[in-house]
């Protein structure tokens, strides 16, 4: 491999990271080719993972009945989740079930048995976080690869809530040791979608040592949560 040559320059990469957004509405009438899904997963499988354990496997679901069943299970598990937020916060901002219309659902599976690929101390100290980090990396590459093809995608992280994971594992005949990490729908975006704001670079970078002028006190942190995050005013429009 020639490490001196690059296929993509940093401006193109930055553009891709900006182009990738979490999309919650999909055009069910527009198919996504087998070739596109293959190309996406071909990129994703090069993700880094602890000990090169590559904990990931994928189930591709195209069948409309199955996809809608998955979304119905999602809606059901959302009920107590919503109730909990309403009880504690008096408001509940949950993502909807728009992903049911994405023509492809990728279920990302993790096989925890790969933890044996970690050195013993690593296994004792951080087997779970290494396992999850590998799965997070492969998931991000799926999103980026999809975006590079002009496709929309989204995280459905509730796929691993106990109720949803149990029902999906039974429905999709997933063997016992494997875990469901996330579900990523892939399709063409329908409707408008926002670009969630990011903290400014100057606010988050420190040089040589931590700059206490940039440290957020509790008031600043509360303002941040209440404005720029999905819990805050930004999330109202999603
Ligand atoms: C670990 C993780 C879990 C997430 N879970 C969900 C989810 O269940 N549903 C959803 O619509 N978005 C989910 N998101 C997407 C975030 O809400 C989204 O990345 C964030 O609001 C920024 O928006 P962007 O992805 O468009 O930049 C998740 C993202 C991450 C990294």
Image (tube, rainbow, N blue to C red):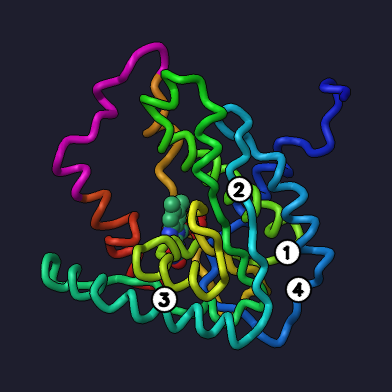
Q: Secondary structure at mark 3?
A: helix
Question: What is the residue that sits farthest to the top in this orientation?
Answer: 208
Indicate left or right for 125 with 133 as reference.
left
Q: Look at the image and tell me whether residue 197 can be seen.
A: no
Q: Secondary structure at mark 1?
A: loop
Q: At 23% from the left edge and 74% from the top edge, which residue is drawn?
A: 80
Q: Nearer the viewer, residue 59 or 190?
A: 59
Instruction: Tell me the quarter of the picture where residue 134 sits.
Output: top right
Indicate left or right for 225 with 112 as reference.
left
Badge 4 or badge 1: first in the primary sequence = 4
Q: Position of residue 237 (x, y in %)?
A: 38, 72
Image disc number at residue 150: 1
Of tags 3 and 1, the one toward the viewer is 3
Badge 2 or badge 3: first in the primary sequence = 2
Badge 4 or badge 3: first in the primary sequence = 4
Q: Position of residue 119 (x, y in %)?
A: 50, 20
Q: Are marks 4 and 3 in contact (CB under 8 Å)?
A: no
The answer to whether the residue bearing label 4 lies less than 8 angstroms from the nearest atom of ligand 1 is no
Question: How many angstroms separate mark 4 from mark 1 (CA)?
Answer: 11 Å
Instruction: State which quarter of the image contains the C terminus.
Output: bottom left
Q: Are marks 3 and 1 in contact (CB under 8 Å)?
A: no
Image disc number at residue 32: 4
Within-10-Å neighbours for mark 3: few <14, some 14–19, many 20+: many
Question: How many angstroms separate mark 4 from mark 3 (CA)?
Answer: 23 Å
- Vertically, is 48 above or below 174? above
Pointer 2 residue: 56
Q: Which residues are magenta?
A: 207-222
Image disc number at residue 74: 3
Question: What is the residue that sits farthest to the front in this orientation?
Answer: 176
């Amino acid at each position: 491999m020639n490490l001196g040559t690059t296929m993509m320059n940093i401006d193109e990469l930055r553009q891709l990271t900006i182009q990738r957004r979490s999309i919650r509405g999909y055009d069910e009438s527009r198919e996504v080719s087998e070739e596109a899904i293959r190309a996406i997963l071909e990129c994703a499988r090069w993700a880094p993972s602890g000990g090169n354990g590559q904990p990931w496997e994928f189930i591709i679901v195209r069948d409309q009945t199955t996809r809608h069943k998955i979304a119905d299970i999602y809606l059901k598990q959302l009920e107590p989740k919503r109730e909990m937020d309403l009880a504690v916060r008096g408001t509940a901002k949950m993502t909807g079930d728009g992903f049911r219309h994405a023509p492809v659902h990728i279920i990302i599976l993790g096989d925890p048995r790969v933890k044996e690929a970690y050195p013993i101390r690593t296994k004792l100290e951080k087997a779970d976080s290494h396992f999850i980090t590998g799965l997070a990396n492969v998931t991000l590459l799926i999103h980026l690869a999809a975006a590079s093809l002009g496709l929309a995608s989204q995280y459905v992280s509730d796929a691993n809530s106990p109720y949803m994971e149990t029902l999906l594992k039974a429905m999709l005949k997933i063997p016992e040791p494997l875990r469901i990490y996330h579900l990523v729908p892939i399709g063409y975006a329908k409707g408008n979608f926002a670009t969630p704001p990011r903290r400014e670079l100057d606010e988050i970078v420190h040089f040589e040592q931590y700059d206490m002028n940039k440290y957020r006190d509790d008031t600043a942190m509360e303002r941040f949560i209440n404005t720029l995050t999905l819990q805050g005013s930004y999330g109202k429009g999603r």
